[in-house]
């Protein structure tokens, strides 16, 4: 099966549980199980290639210029982790079907689970580090949903936020490290990066990249000092905890370290950071786990400890350590998933996870006792179980590891960690299942139905099978180790067996087991000392840090983000001027290559008009109507400037935009006071004047400098001029840029334009439905209103002009690819024509003749533009790549057909729809109570004998 399909199946399948929710719990779980099973079977179809030592590849170029390609890779390591994710996922789904109560939304749960599953499969199969980062962040988001699934529990919401905060911050650091790594090698493909060990380790940025990547791995896999989030994630439902702790999220960081092992390991920095963090985490997690009374808390800290064990093994940098790490990943997944599911069974049946309220369950729950005991003994490292084998390998590697110059530090700490690990496993068995049967259980414990105990039982079968016959797992573990090492020849020849003789690891293991039994016997006094001993609480520290950061953020926001635009503009302008001055004063300024040209009096006069209007706007800005007029003058002068500089497209756009915006702003001013109140002090106005003058002078100086000198580099306009016709099929460079070279920008702009119009509509809807509606309807004009609101001369003139406007708009639209024009300008021209109809005959008459809603016109425009871009994909071209050809239809001459015209049609419709929807929204606000807008095109019509004009005059006298 294609790797793409294996990765996509969980994401596509996530749509199904919600749809099947109404069909019942079994149907919902069944469809989820089927989707995961299909992905699992698809994975197994690639097993022969993986066993043969081949690497299965699949690739689709996504954003090749950015180095982001949808490339997947399946080698031994990726297959191993995908097998755990999907295989244990099947057991978790079956278990969750019987674990969740009828009050739980099973469709929502399995949707989150499949999203998380797909993200994890994507991580382990990614061949592109940027793609891996995308899936990495998806695991953080989907795990947030899973951990916080029980929204009614405060600890669930808190655990989800903590997990997202810690892993999210680590993910941000990891992004930086991965980008540095890609820049070192010149490629973001893992298959390329993994072949450049010497290049990466010789680079001066190796250490920063290593630290950033390890931050991502450590936060994900709960390594010290980021270990605290994982135990709080136990507030999730037990199926989630079992999945996260055994095969998925916390193993993502382990996978990352194993995947990057060939290029990052083997240096003193890797050894010191990874080995030290793993060793501390291993011991600390084991010690804390022993004194936890909540079964899931004990298992959560045991997961932290064993993740530290695996991290330490990867940190040693030896081939044997890597093989031991791979073996323990397999063993830990089996016994830890079984243990979490067993804890869920106990909680489900006894209604408590508190070890102090349990005991004697071996008689009441014999099946659960056998499953949990075998899994716990494996975790303790007891012979004939799989955990013993990988623990022996760990102790063997620790015995030969020298840290900080001490040959004893690692062996001693590894033994201590194993001792406490054995102790909490013995406590789990002894305090939960042994002892007398109690009569104060919250509920009468008993073994559950098959659906709950069968999934962990299957895992325990693997625990025993591998422990008794380790040769069954040896070939596969060595295959995976070869992928980790990047060289099959480097895999250790040591074979897996139960008895290795009287070696140091055996003595260390015996010490750990005996010490664990002794610690269990001394548990009460040890617990007393633990409770009395002062120690930092990671959760309290984390919450204090979050609160301090939030307090600092609030202080900064209140000081800088107070809502005053003038302050934002002043800060930004001063910073830009300061940075520009620094560049100017420290850089090299070349000599002038051009001379100042003579300016005719007409140009000087035009410039003075522009400057006068601008200055007048600053001085008289409190008068809103006068400001609008001055803005129109500024826009008109800018249009004339575009004409002078031979930019007719820009001139036409500027002029039509001015007309449309002036009309819309006039409508908006109808609801605002005539003047703006004085809100700023004299001191602030002086400050703003100084900043504005400073910015203006800096802009003038920089512009004058560049006008007197040739461009430093070849301007991009030369590329556009050379390729406009050849690549876009048009001689109008401006239009070809808009619809082809920068078509994606244009597409985004029309979407933004449509959203702005829809927001205006939504705001007016809110006003008309709220308490403001009465004030709007009953407002009284402060001046006498005309008795002839729809003059006959204007109506006749707009009727005559309308066909001409449509013809001009159509002509401007068609010629836009080769002459000044295009869809944007044509849309504005047609909008002006339609606006004139509204102005002449009123909103009621015009809207009654509206055949298509403006919302639909906007949507049609965006849809047509988008489909035009998507059409390129069917011909193997990037999004919005245009094509053109020439056709001849008798009796017409040969003419051009370009796909860009369809895109331009979308722009045209979006512009018309946005302008008219904004006008319609303002017009609805302009209605008055008691005033009926005429259904006729004009108020006074010589051909009509009625009293419309008289009725309006009477209404005016009443002050309506």
Image (cartoon, rainbow, N blue to C red):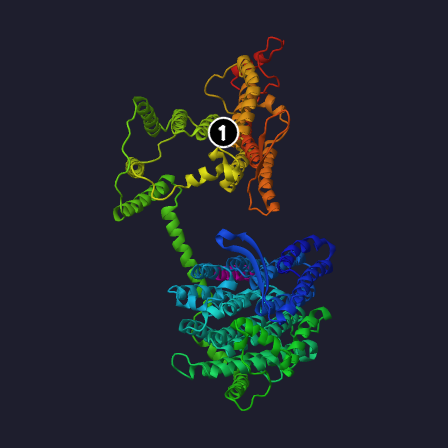
Residue 752 horizontal/vertical position (percent): 51, 39
Residue labelled with disc 1: 819
Q: Nearer the viewer, residue 75 or 378?
A: 75
Residue 147 horizontal/vertical position (percent): 57, 61
Relative placement, left or right, of 298 versus 645 is right
Snapshot quadrant of residue 271: bottom left
Q: On screen, 114 above or below 838?
A: below
Q: On screen, 716 above or below 256?
A: above
The boundaries of the magenta stretch are 155-167
- In the rendered image, is residue 2 in sight? yes
Q: Which of 768 and 771 is in front in this view?
A: 768
The structure residue drawn at horizontal position 40% and vertical position 71%, both measured from the top left corner, is 269
**Which secondary structure is most common in the magenta stretch?**
helix
Residue 894 horizontal/vertical position (percent): 59, 29
Q: Nearer the viewer, residue 760 or 804?
A: 804
Q: Which of 787 and 533 is in front in this view?
A: 787
- In the rendered image, is residue 357 in sight? no
Q: SS of the residue at dot 1?
A: loop
Task: State which quarter of the image contains the N terminus.
Answer: bottom right
Q: On screen, 934 above or below 154?
A: above
């Amino acid at each position: 099966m294609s790797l793409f399909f294996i990765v996509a199946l969980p994401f596509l399948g996530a749509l199904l549980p919600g749809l099947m929710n109404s069909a019942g719990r079994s149907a919902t779980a069944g469809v989820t199980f089927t989707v995961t099973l299909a992905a699992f079977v698809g994975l197994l179809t690639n097993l022969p290639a993986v066993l043969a030592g081949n690497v299965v590849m699949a690739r689709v170029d996504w954003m090749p210029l950015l180095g982001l390609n949808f490339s997947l890779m399946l080698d031994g390591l990726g297959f191993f982790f995908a097998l755990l994710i999907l295989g244990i996922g099947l057991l978790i789904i079956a278990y969750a079907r019987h674990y969740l109560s009828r009050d739980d939304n099973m469709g929502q749960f399995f949707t989150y689970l499949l999203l998380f599953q797909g993200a994890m499969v994507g991580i382990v199969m990614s061949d592109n580090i940027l793609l891996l980062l995308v899936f990495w962040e998806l695991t953080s988001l989907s795990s947030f949903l899973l951990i916080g699934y029980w929204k009614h529990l405060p600890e669930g919401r808190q655990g989800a936020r903590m997990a997202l905060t810690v892993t999210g911050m680590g993910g941000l650091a990891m992004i930086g490290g991965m980008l540095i790594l890609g820049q070192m090698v010149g490629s973001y493909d893992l298959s390329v990066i993994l072949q450049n060990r010497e290049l990466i380790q010789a680079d001066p940025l190796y250490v920063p990249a290593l630290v950033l990547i390890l931050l991502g791995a450590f936060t994900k896999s709960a390594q010290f000092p980021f270990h605290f989030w994982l135990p709080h994630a136990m507030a999730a439902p037990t199926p989630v905890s079992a999945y996260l702790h055994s095969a998925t999220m916390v193993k993502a960081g382990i996978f990352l370290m194993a995947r990057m092992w060939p290029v990052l390991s083997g240096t003193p920095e890797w050894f010191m950071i990874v080995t030290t963090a793993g060793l501390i985490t291993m011991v600390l997690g084991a010690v804390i786990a022993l004194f936890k009374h909540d079964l899931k808390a004990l298992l959560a800290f045991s997961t932290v400890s064993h993740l530290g064990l695996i991290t330490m093994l990867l940190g040693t940098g030896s081939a044997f350590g890597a093989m031991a790490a791979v073996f323990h990943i397999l063993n830990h997944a089996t016994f830890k998933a079984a243990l979490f599911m067993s804890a869920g069974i106990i909680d489900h049946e006894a209604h408590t996870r508190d070890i102090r309220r349990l005991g004697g369950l071996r008689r009441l729950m014999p099946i659960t006792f056998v499953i949990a005991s075998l899994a716990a003994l494996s975790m303790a490292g007891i012979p004939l179980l799989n955990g013993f084998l990988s623990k022996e390998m760990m102790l063997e590697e620790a015995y030969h590891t020298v840290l900080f110059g001490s040959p004893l530090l690692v062996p001693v700490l590894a033994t201590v960690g194993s001792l406490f690990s054995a102790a909490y496993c013995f406590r789990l068995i002894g305090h939960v299942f042994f002892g007398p049967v109690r009569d104060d259980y919250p509920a009468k414990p008993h073994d559950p139905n098959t659906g709950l105990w069968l999934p962990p039982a299957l895992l325990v079968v693997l625990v025993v099978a591998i422990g008794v016959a380790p040769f069954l797992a040896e070939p596969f573990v060595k295959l995976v180790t070869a992928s980790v090492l990047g060289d099959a020849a480097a895999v250790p020849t040591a074979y897996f067996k139960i008895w290795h003789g009287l070696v140091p690891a055996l003595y260390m293991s015996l010490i750990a087991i005996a010490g664990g039994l002794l610690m269990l016997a001394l548990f009460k006094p040890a617990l007393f000392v633990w409770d009395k001993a002062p120690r930092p609480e990671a959760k309290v520290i984390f919450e204090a840090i979050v609160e301090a950061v939030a307090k600092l953020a609030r202080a900064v926001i209140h000081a800088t983000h107070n809502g005053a635009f003038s302050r934002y503009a002043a800060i930004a302008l001063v910073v830009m001027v300061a940075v520009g001055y620094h560049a100017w004063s420290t850089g090299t300024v070349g000599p002038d290559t051009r001379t100042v040209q003579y300016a005719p009096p007409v140009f000087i006069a035009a410039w003075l008009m522009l400057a006068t209007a601008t200055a007048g706007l600053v001085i008289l800005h409190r008068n809103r109507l006068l400001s609008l007029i001055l803005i129109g003058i500024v826009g008109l002068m800018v249009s004339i400037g575009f004409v002078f500089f031979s930019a007719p497209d820009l001139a036409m756009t500027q002029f039509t935009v001015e007309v449309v915006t002036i009309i819309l702003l006039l409508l908006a001013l109808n609801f605002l006071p005539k003047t703006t109140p004085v809100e700023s002090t004299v001191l602030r106005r002086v400050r703003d004047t100084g900043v504005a003058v400073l910015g203006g002078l800096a802009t003038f100086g920089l512009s004058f400098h560049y006008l007197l000198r040739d461009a430093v580099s070849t301007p991009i306009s030369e590329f556009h001029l050379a390729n406009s016709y050849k690549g876009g099929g048009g001689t109008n460079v401006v239009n070809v840029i808009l619809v082809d070279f920068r078509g994606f920008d244009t597409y985004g702009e029309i979407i933004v334009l449509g959203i702005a119009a829809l927001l205006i509509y939504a705001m007016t809807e809110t006003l008309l439905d709220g308490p403001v509606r009465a004030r709007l309807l009953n407002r009284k004009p402060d001046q006498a209103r005309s008795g002839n609101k729809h003059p006959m001369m204007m109506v006749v003139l707009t009727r005559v002009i309308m066909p001409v406007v449509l013809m001009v708009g159509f002509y401007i639209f068609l010629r836009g690819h080769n002459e000044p024009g295009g869809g944007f300008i044509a849309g504005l021209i047609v909008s002006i024509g339609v606006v004139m109809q509204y102005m002449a005959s009123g909103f009621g008459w015009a809207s009654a003749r509206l055949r298509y809603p403006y919302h639909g016109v906007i949507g049609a425009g965006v849809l047509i533009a988008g489909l035009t871009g998507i059409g390129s994909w069917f011909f193997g071209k990037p999004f919005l790549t245009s094509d053109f050809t020439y056709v001849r239809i008798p009796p017409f001459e040969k003419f051009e057909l370009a796909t860009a015209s369809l895109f331009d049609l979308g722009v045209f419709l979006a512009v018309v729809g946005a302008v008219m929807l904004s006008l319609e929204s303002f017009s609805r606000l302009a209605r008055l109570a008691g005033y009926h807008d005429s259904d006729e095109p004009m108020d006074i019509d010589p051909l009509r004998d009625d009293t419309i004009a008289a009725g309006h005059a009477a209404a005016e006298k009443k002050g309506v």
